[in-house]
Image (spheres, grey):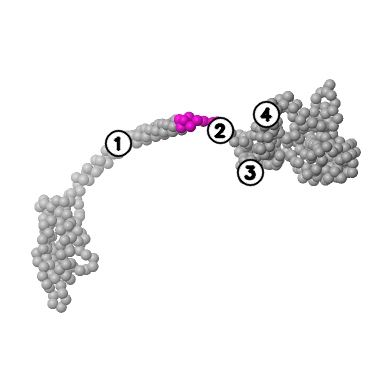
Amino acid sequence: MIARAKTLPSAPGGSEAKMLSLMVEREFAPDHKKLVFDYNLGTGDTDRASVLLVAAPQLVLDQFTAMAGAAGLTVTGITGSTMCLTGCGDGAADRDRIILHLFGGGAELVLLGPGGIGMMRRLPVKIPVGAGGDQLWGDGLMLRELTDELRRVVALLPGAGSADKTQRELLIWDETGLDPDDRKVLSEKLELPVRTCERPEGLELGAGSRPVPGAQFSAAAAMALSSVRGNALTIDLLHSRLSPPKRLGVGRKAAWGAALLGTLVVAGTFLVLDWREDVLEVASLTGRLNDMADDLAEAKHVIDKVNFARPWYGRRPSYLDCMREVTLAFPQEGLIWTTSVAIQEDMKVVLSGKGVSESAVLDVLDRLKANPKFSDVKPLYLRQAGREEPQVAFAMSFTFSYSGKTWSSQNAKRSSSQPR
């Protein structure tokens, strides 16, 4: 098993599982899918909370489940052996308990505080399977190795430098035959009170229980007692709180039907909301239009007056539009120019001038004919002029039309009567 202590910012609503899932994907990538994770949420200050994150290989858990199934048993939970012992030992409520589990094959240590399990660690101490008593601890080498590892771990615990040495105690579940003198050495080296837990007292089995020397099988007995007493496991890798939810098998037709139903519901909801939005917008615009009714009527009355008075007070001479269109028909290069322009009241125009070539004059004549505002466009003459430089003299006539209509004599009189 892998155990890591984490500190998370306090967040309501159970969001610590989401934060831990992100940590798992980042720290254990790309092997996080091969592991099963669970956590124990402890207590901290008002801003942060301590969490113990535990992981185990999925393959090993599957082997446990298969082995139990072959024996006709139902697995209700999977946790660490030493974690089962955290609920036993009858420790003081105001102390942090360091639980040391010695067994054939190794040693594990768990830190249990008021907020729950704060740390779990496998000590790098090799205890041979089947060895115990003087055979294991007689020469003192194994005891020194264990003491050194414990001192290193205890020195790194929070508050290790505190002057109050009674704030923690060491509880030992020993399956290897550690004698009282060895326990006294541990207490002196670690400067901590040391107690040994044995059955039945350590498991709190009550009066009448058959005494069993040592702590052999205490972890298994503690887990069984926890299940009988209805206590939930602190860490349960079989029911991980960090596992993704299992997807229910859905048939292909059912999936298509659900997708179609969801599409229809979304489309119907969108249409209803869109229709409601349009109704509200129409109602709003109608209300604004009704509020503006008086202003619109007054504006329309003013526009009618202005349109009625505009023909009598207009100051724009009518021949300006004609001159503009004639100017646009001439090229910018200066190949042709006028010497005389005569505009009559009926907007008949006689234009004369000179050009550098006949093609330049004919090009202007074609442009005038192509303009729908000019009609009856005719050349009057086109002949050579000038001896030193080759030039041509020309004259042409046409009629200017305003808005597609030829100016009438009435319009001419009205424009001639306007002040200039």
Type of the residue with mark 3? Asp
How far apart marks 1 and 2 lie (CA) works out to 62 Å
Which residue appears farthest toward the bottom when viewing the image? 388
**Neighbourhood count class around disc 2 (C-alpha, 10 Å): few under 14, some 14–19, many 20 upward:** few
For marks 3 and 4, the one nearer the N-term is 3
Residues at badges 4 and 1 in contact (C-beta under 8 Å)? no
Q: Position of residue 16 (x, y in %)?
A: 63, 37
Q: Report which residue position mark 4 lands on.
A: 69
Range of magenta residues: 248-258
Q: In which image quadrant can residue 241 be found?
A: top right
3 or 4: mark nearer the eye: 4
Residues at badges 4 and 2 in contact (C-beta under 8 Å)? no
Label 4, secondary structure: give it.
helix
Q: Report which residue position mark 3 lands on.
A: 31
For marks 2 and 3, the one nearer the N-term is 3
Q: Is residue 331 left or right of residue 68?
A: left
Rendered image: mark on residue 28:
none
Type of the residue with mark 1? Ala
